[in-house]
Image (cartoon, grey):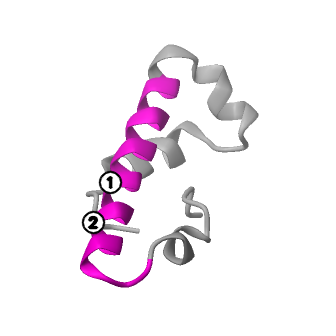
Amino acid sequence: MPVEPADVSRRYPATLRGIVETWRWRIHFRWELEQKLKDNPHLVDDIGLTRRQVEAEIAKRFWQA
């Protein structure tokens, strides 16, 4: 189950700049997710994800959707 919103690809066009912006968004998104897991693990349950799903998302490289 992907955690990333489906509209990310629509948010940034398929240009080099768009690709870089998508990568930057993923880096920031995954960093925030990691902080939530560390600081407030109960919030992960509130957004409907398991700890394993969050850890799998955090472990992805920035170029992986």
Q: Is residue 49 left or right of residue 22?
A: right
What's the residue type where badge 1 is placed? Arg
Quadrant showing the C terminus: bottom left
Where is residue 34? Give x, y as percent: 42, 32
**What residue do we see at 57% from left, 56% from top?**
3
Give me the disc on residue 20. 2
Circle 1 residue: 24
Q: Quadrant of residue 61?
A: bottom left
Separation (CA) of disc 2 from disc 1: 6 Å
Where is residue 4? Give x, y as percent: 54, 59
What's the residue type where badge 2 is placed? Val
**What residue do we see at 53% from left, 70% from top?**
11
Front-most of residues 62 and 49:
62
Q: Is residue 36 magenta?
A: yes
Q: Is residue 25 magenta?
A: yes
Disc 2 secondary structure class: helix
Where is residue 48? Give x, y as percent: 72, 43
Q: Residue furthest top?
A: 39
Front-most of residues 19 and 54:
19
Disc 1 secondary structure class: helix
- 2 and 1 marks in contact (CB < 8 Å): yes
Give me the disc on residue 8. none
**What residue do we see at 40% from left, 53% from top?**
25
- The range drawn in magenta is 13-37
* Badge 1 density bin: few <14, some 14–19, many ≥20, Cα 10 Å: few
Quadrant showing the N terminus: bottom right
Q: Quadrant of residue 41?
A: top right
Q: Is residue 53 left or right of residue 49?
A: left
**What residue do we see at 66% from left, 21% from top?**
42
Q: Is residue 62 left or right of residue 42?
A: left
